Image (cartoon, rainbow, N blue to C red):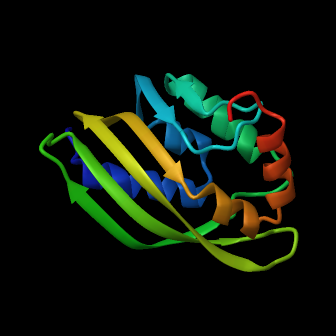
Amino acid sequence: MPQTPRQLLERFQQAMLDFSPDALADLFAEDAVYELPFLAPRREASRYEGREQIRAGFARARASPHPSPVVGFRDVRVHDTADPELIIAEHEFDAVNHATGESFTSGSVLFLQVRGAQIIHVRDYADILRLSAGLGRLPQLFEQLQNTDHV
C-alpha cells in the first residue's frame, strides 16, 4: 500500500527513537541510498547504498558502547516540493550524552524521497557540530578534520 512521504518520515523518526536497525532498514527500497553529507570525515561510511548496507551501518552504530543519543523529535517542519515523492523535513531533536547523563539539543534537515511504500533516498544534513559538542566529541571531530585529505 502506498504511503505518503510524511507517513514514512514519521515511521523513520520512530525507528530512530527505537534505535532499531531492522525497523529503519525495512522502510527502505532494496536499492535505496542513505547519505550523510555533513558526517565528519572518518572511516565509517557517509553513504549507504542498498537496504542491507543501511541495516548493517545502523547495526554497527547500535552495537557501539552507547545507545542512540536521540530521545525525541520536536519543531518538525515539513516542506512539500514540486516533486510529490520528495519532502524536506527540518527538525530539532532532544538527545542525551549517555556518558555524562547531560541532555542537549541538535538538529537535522532531511531530504526524503519515496516511491510507493518505501523510501528510495535520504540525504541527512545533521548538525555535526552541535551533536559532537553534546556528546563531548568536539576534540575528536577537530582532529579528524585536521587529519583528512577531504578538507
In the image, residue 9 lies at what x, y percent?
36, 53
Q: Residue furthest bottom?
A: 102
Among the 4 quarters of the image, the one containing residue 43: top right
The quarter in which the C terminus is drawn is top right
| Residue at 74% over, 37% down | 60
Quarter holding the N terminus is top left
Residue at image point 49% right, 49% down = 125
- Tell me the residue at 82%/66% (across/down): 136
Left or right: 8, with 14 as reference point: left
Q: Nearer the viewer, residue 64 or 126?
A: 126
- Judged left or right of residue 13, residue 41 is right
Picture layout, residue 134 above or below residue 34: below
On the image, the x and y values in percent for residue 104 come to 67, 76
Left or right: 107 in relation to 21 = left
Image coordinates of residue 63 in percent, x first then y, are 79, 43
Query: Is 49 situated above or below 9?
Result: above
What residue is drawn where x is 49% and y is 34%? 34
